[in-house]
Amino acid sequence: AQSVSQHNHHVILSEAASLELGCNYSYGGTVNLFWYVQYPGQHLQLLLKYFSGDPLVKGIKGFEAEFIKSKFSFNLRKPSVQWSDTAEYFCAVNAPSSASKIIFGSGTRLSIRP
Amino acid sequence: SAVISQKPSRDICQRGTSLTIQCQVDSQVTMMFWYRQQPGQSLTLIATANQGSEATYESGFVIDKFPISRPNLTFSTLTVSNMSPEDSSIYLCSAVPRGSNTEAFFGQGTRLTVV
């Protein structure tokens, strides 16, 4: 069965700092990988996704993530965060053989100090 | 993409009662799922709603507690039965549109409080 681990439960940064949120997954086969964001009081939105091809994927709002197959990782990065990036970030994995169901990590709460 | 509408958006219910949550998608979708997000926690998959057949439940979730229907490609319901305060949570409907290659969209959720 698939599982997803997010290493950081709560990250606090100042504006303009660089961000990296860790994500590791457990599954031996082909996977699709996602980062979702949940802003306070809002529903889940897709930040970016990896299905195949270039392992460095770019998403909305300046976010990017790199798929490293040998490390089973899909870390999220942003070179300079803004106060508006304050949100909960969820890494998620889907195995195409598992009928499209998506399994989520525990989430990382990101707080940005203005 | 898909726009997902859930009703009700929130409710406060007495323990021992049941609540049915409705999920409507604006386009035909291949897969529909129900998740639970307990306060301060991540999303836990409850079940896959299968059109015209019984839902597929994840470990720890059973049909008697969470009956699910999916009569067509755009609509599903989740019932939370015989509620207790531990069922207080946000319940989310998710859908994968046809041809989207498994990207999932989410509704706003139903915030349930059991008193």
Image (tube, coloured by chain):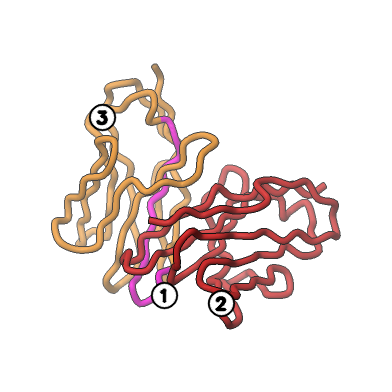
Residue at point 51% right, 60% down? B25
Query: Which tag is nearer the camera, tag 3 or tag 1?
Result: 1
For label 2, the residue is: B56
Q: Colour of chain B?
A: red
Q: Quadrant of residue B56?
A: bottom right
Provide residue B58's location: percent of width, then percent of height: 56, 71
| Outermost residue to the left | A54
Residue A55: assigned label = none
Asked whether residue A9 is in view, the answer is: no
Tell me the colour chain A is drawn in: orange
* Residue nearest the observer in this picture, A5 or B10: B10
Q: Position of residue B1 (x, y in %)?
A: 37, 56
- Locate the C terminus of chain A by quadrant: top left
Give the secondary structure at mark 1. Answer: loop
Bounds of the magenta segment: A86-100
Image position of A59 (left or right of A12)? left
Q: Residue tagged by mark 1?
A: A99
Chain identity of mark 3: A
Residue type at numbered disc 3: Ser
Residue corresponding to mark 3: A18
Residues at badges 1 and 2 in contact (C-beta under 8 Å)? yes
Residue at image location 22% in from the left, 31% down from the top: A79
